[in-house]
Amino acid sequence: MLLSTLGKNTDIDYKYSDEEESEEEEEDVENEAEEGSGDEIEVNSDVSDEETLSSRQQQATAQQDVDDDEDEDDDDDDDDDEEGSGEQTKNEEKPSEDGSDDDEDENDEEEDADDDEDEADDDDEDEEDEEADVKVNVQDIFFKRMDYDIGEKMAAKLGEGKIAGKTSEEKWPCLGKMLCTSPSSQSEGVKKTKGNSLQDLRVRKRIADQWKRVNAEFVEDEKQIFTPYQEEMFAVMNSYQDLLYTDRSHKNAEELRNVYCLHILNHVIKSRSTVLKHNSMLSADPNLDSETMRDQGLTRPRVLIVVPFRDAALRIVNTFIKLLETQGTTQHVSHRKRFQDEYSDENPHQSKVPKPEDWEATFSGNTDDHFRIGLAVSRKHLRLYTKFYMSDIIIASPLGLRTVIGTKGEKHQDYDFLSSIEILFMDQADVFLMQNWDHINHLMEYMHLQPQESHDVDFSRVRMWALNRWNKFYRQTVICSSIAVPELKALFNRHCHNYAGRIMIQNPPVNGSICQVVTQLPQVFHKVECGSFSEDAQKRFDFFVKKILPQFRDGIMAGTMIYVPSYFDFVRIRNYFRKQEIKFAQICEYTSQPNIVRARQYMVGGNRHYLVYTERFHFYRRYKLRGITNLIFYQLPSYPHYYSELCNMLDSRRGTVTEHTCMVLYSKYDAHRLAAVVGADRCAHMLSTEKNVHMLVSGEER
């Protein structure tokens, strides 16, 4: 792979620049150059993707050899009484070496003295809770789901992708259009939440009592449990069906995070309570038949949350803490200070020039993309930095998981912790596309493989469907993204086999982002004919070279920017320009800061006819470029608002407004991108008509 990953602590180190604008672009660019290397993109072009991962693997292995003894002592008393997995693992992050955890460890040692007594009390209380819930457990979808046996015939059909069931389409006020597929008669479908309290919705009292306080900023009436959006989203998640949701935005991100944290904690606490109840029963009577007490998987981790940056992990853990903290008491969180130090951003980046709201929301806080952390939940403790095989929840980035999992043939591979995941949650999945989508595909290939070691599991307590290797049919997968792209749908169709069914929420855009173009601009859309997806790249390149590029060679067309979403297409165009000895400037995610400054000066001064510009660079920097008078979209942007953003960027200082031009290349495989730009109805017409050229004019006359 030419492209390994983006973000801090990788071979490509992004530190976002403070773009200082003035009336003259030359002064702007010179000021950026004087600001130094703080905005540089560090690139080692000699380092391959495999070498990058190998280096990361060696670092992870070195960290695995360092034992956090005080944390381990703190965990043992609690975890030995839950699920039997006392084995040490390699997956622990390196402890702090600066003594920043001394206060936390002292508190842990004080708590250790009372752990045995606390756990004994916990068992009694949990048993009482379970006895009180015997009647409602019959209706609780969690217990119905975990105790249901799909059978060999259903497992075979699900494994082969032969889903026989009903498909229905629903429309809810907030979530919009929902395509629901129910392959099993056991699936009850999705129903809107009904009840006056979270207890009616089968949410554990421990977290239900804290919910109103945590969610108070979003609800208008104190009597409300959820906002209308949260009510519908919780109903979908609590049905335990797979979900592909492509309408996430920076505006609903916090509401969404609260809901899925509630769902995940509810699942973990119910699982833990069941285990503790059975432990207590077996301790009281060792002769009991444990066949009726199968309550575990092959390994302990039950929930995997994949997010792109450390800041997202920080927000999730802080939400967990708020939900677990009982009013009037303190929830002990081990290594809390260390966590805040490592995952927060003490010196937040302050841009001198305002950036778009979505950029500010995405890149606020710590944007390191290489991390992983285990969490263990008990009645009075939330333990951070637990070893993977002693964790209930794992929060990690795609790169953080890739360096632990490794690749086939490597000496230090470890993927057993993925064998019994019951909830897989991917938030901000669109950002994964801008990092390295191969890491996600790699993760899914290693989900639910047979463990290489036993990890001290008690096989008499392992659920039969886990022993039959049917875990993937009982896993709920939730993917949240702000854009609908084929990669997400392919992932959803290929790796989501939940017997309860699945739901896709996709609302076709009515108008498209072209309505936000305020510049009076003729936009010409050219359809590229191709017989198959494998031909698309070559046909597009040939059409660009033979039909589009000749129209922009004239001197009057100087200041043309070629927007290229794919890095591989960027390399292809760059090599062609060099071979043809065409003078051009280039800016991509690997371009150094001095070369970025130089390229921008070329375009402002008119010294280069073309600027070849990549989507991933725009995603991470969002510069407002000057000196651009013409646009060529080699392919439509993944993010539809980039289209209007770039069109509105056109510089009119060189002439009248009517001199601007915009050309777009699209094929039938760009249907999602085209619909998001021009609207669903117009997209259908442009793809079905025999005409291959369409011109749209936006903006008003000045």
Image: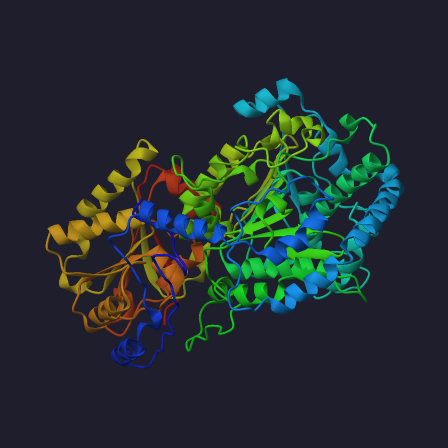
| Residue drawn 32% across the image and 78% down it | 35
| Residue drawn 78% across the image and 57% down it | 114
| Residue drawn 33% across the image and 62% down it | 521
- In the picture, measured across the screen, residue 401 lies left or right of residue 220, that is left
Q: Nearer the viewer, residue 448 or 91?
A: 91
- In the picture, measured across the screen, residue 112 lies left or right of residue 403, that is right
Where's residue 210, x and y in %?
Answer: 77, 60
Does residue 183 show up?
no
Where's residue 90, x and y in %?
Answer: 51, 46
Q: Nearer the viewer, residue 272 or 423?
A: 272
Q: Is residue 181 above or below residue 110?
A: above
Identify the colour scheme used.
rainbow
The image quadrant of residue 322 is bottom right
Q: Nearer the viewer, residue 625 or 207?
A: 207
The quadrant in which the N terminus is found is top left
Q: Is residue 153 above or below residue 508?
A: above
The image quadrant of residue 339 is bottom right
